Image (cartoon, rainbow, N blue to C red):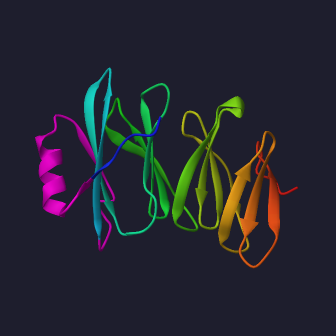
Amino acid sequence: MKLPIIFWETKNLLLQHLANARISVLIGEDVESPVRYVSCSVTCWEGSVEIGIFSNQVGNDLCCWLLSRCNRLLVGHDQEITVVDLSGARIINSASLEGLFFEFVIESTIGQILAIHELGVLALSQDAEFRWRFIAPDILTGWQITEENIRLSIMDSDYIELDKLRGRQL
């Protein structure tokens, strides 16, 4: 489930919001020049957890996706995917992407989450374990997900078809 996000005008306002929360996690604390300050709230059996995000990109998409079991949160931001364990209120994994994050595509029939980014796809299990990665030869201009395949439109090129389950080029 995609969670709504709140934009904060300054770093201090976001930090004050997180300080007032009973449980909070900060993502992107080591970003050198943050230009966007964002948060989302997650309420589950552990209580309410506030997630704060420092982002160094203005125009890219940012997404907080709550996994169905309500114990993990996927955050797509900048050139990274971050996995937060909500029961422990801590970051448990992250993966750098080759390009800016675009969106999560949930493929529940095969138990997979696809993180689409500027230069390819990163596949994760429904438990947020990294499965496979595909890097395109140039920037993606679009994508289409079918029952069995992923069709990536590539800048100044035609398209590439991938096996959705294994990420292999067809």
Residue 75 shown left or right of residue 40 in the figure: right
Give yes or no for residue 22 being in the magenta stretch: yes
The stretch of residues the image draws in magenta is: 7-33
Residue that sits furthest to the right in the current view: 170
Q: Residue at x 76, y 42 (%)?
A: 165
Residue 106 shown left or right of residue 1 in the figure: right
58 or 79: nearer the viewer: 58
Q: Residue at x 34, y 41 (%)?
A: 90
Q: How many marks?
A: 0
Q: Residue at x 54, y 53 (%)?
A: 103
For the C terminus, the quadrant is bottom right
Rendered location of residue 160, percent (x, y):
81, 62
Q: Is residue 112 above or below residue 93?
A: above
Q: Is residue 7 above or below residue 32?
A: above
Residue 150 shown left or right of residue 20 in the figure: right
**Image quarter of residue 120:** bottom right
Give yes or no for residue 142 being in the magenta stretch: no
Rendered location of residue 67, percent (x, y):
49, 33
Residue 75 shown left or right of residue 108 in the figure: left
Q: Is residue 163 above or below residue 67?
A: below
**Image quarter of residue 37:** bottom left
Rendered location of residue 27, percent (x, y):
33, 53
Rendered location of residue 76, percent (x, y):
47, 53
Residue that sits furthest to the top in the current view: 45
